[in-house]
Amino acid sequence: MELAVYNKNGEKTARTISLDDSIFGISPNDHAIYLDVKQILANKRQGTHKSKEKGEITGSTRKLKKQKGTGTARFGSIKSPLFRGGGRVFGPRPRDYHFKLNKKLKRLARKSALSYKASENKITILEDFTFETPKTKNFVQLIKSFSLEGKKIIILFPGTDLNVAMSARNLQEVLYQNSSNINTFDIMKAQQLLIVESSIKDINEMFNN
């Protein structure tokens, strides 16, 4: 797959770059994407939810009325779930939501996500650039150059360019990311991928090693 290379002003250069079809041109595997996204979201969960059950409520254990003959439900104490302020029945308890997936499946999921974006023409290649100073308006101007206002964007760099990263960090819809740290969830969530030209080498090495 051949894509044109643009400069940061949104102008097409005379150069093109070839994307590896084994990464950007495969037949996407939807189930692999589903499993990988499910794992990413599950691993983000803290799992600290907790409610008190009957045995954990502070209160008297005195039996409030006799067991039989009242015509109403039986209960043992004020801590019964039948009363307001009583214990919760089968309430949530702390748990670990983490689970593992094998590396080959996660790799397939990322390739599938990139292939979806490539097939939908949602990948733009930028020639290497930087900003002289970290200013948000620099990145806003870059977004306007490509008519991407209001869209969720990931920009991939081959490392950390502080001036560009700091220019993008205050923009809610923009995610600056190292090209070697891409994940399926972020790729699928983005409406446009801006990939700096030198990042392609890192992406190829990540999937071909």
Image: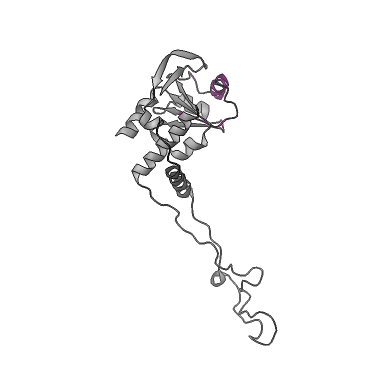
Image coordinates of residue 114 in percent, x first then y, are 44, 33
Q: Is residue 88 magenta?
A: no
Range shown magenta: 129-155
138 on left or right of 156: right
Above-or-below relation of 1 to 45 = above
**Quadrant of the rendered structure where residue 200 is?**
top left
Residue at 50% of width from left, 62% of height from top? 93
Specify whether residue 136 is painted magenta: yes
Q: Which residue is most to the left? A: 209
- Relative image position of residue 28 (x, y in whole percent): 43, 37
Of 113 and 42, the residue lying toward us:
113
Question: What percent of the width, then of the height, locates residue 56?
Answer: 54, 69
Residue found at the very far front of the displayed protein: 27
**Residue at image location 44% in from the left, 39% down from the top:** 184
Position of residue 97 relative to residue 7, above or below, is below
Q: Residue furthest bottom?
A: 69
Q: In the rendered picture of this protein, how many numbered marks are placed on residues? A: 0
Quadrant where the image shows the N terminus? top left
Quarter of the image where the C terminus is located: top left
Residue 35 in the image: above or below residue 168: below
Q: In the displayed structure, does residue 196 sit left or right of residue 192?
A: left
Q: Nearer the viewer, residue 3 or 164?
A: 3
Quadrant of the image occupied by residue 67: bottom right
Q: Is residue 77 left or right of residue 161?
A: right
Residue at the far right in the pictured view: 71
**Which is nearer the eye, 82 or 152?**
152
Does residue 77 sit above or below 167 in this rendering?
below
Residue 120 image position (x, y, % from top left): 50, 29
| Colour logic | one colour
At horizontal 47% and vertical 33% (from top left) the residue drawn is 116
